[in-house]
């Protein structure tokens, strides 16, 4: 996905890191880059909002059940695969 406008951080890079950003797993430099990008890019901001809403919904309904670490890794890998397929 790309909005077609030039950014210091590419739209694809931002969307690949959006879950890590939401989870607070990025260093401050990456967080700043993503915040700046989201301020400039409406399509990525909308995608971020959707991803954040999904995370909140899952946390609210599944937050008390522990999730195996390998499951999270498998889900993130599959998301990256689907995004790569869509980008082709």
Image (spheres, rainbow, N blue to C red):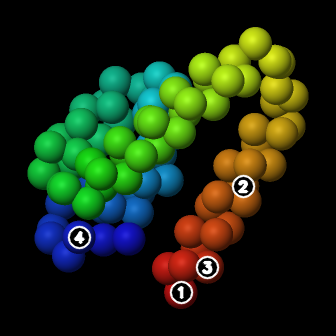
Residue with the mark numbered 3 = 85
Q: Is residue 51 left or right of residue 84?
A: left
Q: Are marks 1 and 2 in contact (CB under 8 Å)?
A: no
Residue with the mark numbered 2 = 77
Residue with the mark numbered 4 = 3
Disc 2/disc 3 C-alpha distance (Å):
12 Å
Who's the residue at 40% across and 63% down the image?
12
The N terminus - image quarter: bottom left
Q: Position of residue 32 (x, y in %)?
A: 25, 32
Q: Are marks 2 and 4 in contact (CB under 8 Å)?
A: no
Disc 3/disc 1 C-alpha distance (Å):
5 Å
Q: Position of residue 27 (x, y in %)?
A: 42, 26
Q: Are marks 2 and 3 in contact (CB under 8 Å)?
A: no
User: How many other residues sit within 10 Å of disc 1, few (<14), some (14-19) or many (≥20)?
Assistant: few
Q: Position of residue 61 (x, y in %)?
A: 67, 24
Q: Secondary structure at mark 3?
A: helix
User: How many other residues sit within 10 Å of disc 2, few (<14), some (14-19) or many (≥20)?
Assistant: few
Disc 1/disc 2 C-alpha distance (Å):
17 Å
Who's the residue at 47% across and 23% down the image?
24
- Mark before the other along the chain sequence, 1 or 4: 4
- Mark before the other along the chain sequence, 2 or 3: 2
């Amino acid at each position: 996905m790309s909005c077609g406008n030039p950014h210091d951080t590419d739209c694809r890079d931002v969307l690949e890191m959006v879950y890590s950003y939401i989870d607070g797993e990025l260093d401050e430099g990456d967080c700043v880059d993503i915040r700046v990008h989201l301020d400039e890019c409406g399509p990525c901001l909308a995608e971020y909002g959707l991803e954040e809403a999904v995370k909140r919904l899952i946390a609210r309904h599944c937050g008390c059940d522990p999730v195996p670490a390998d499951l999270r890794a498998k889900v993130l890998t599959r998301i990256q695969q689907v995004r790569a397929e869509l980008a082709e």
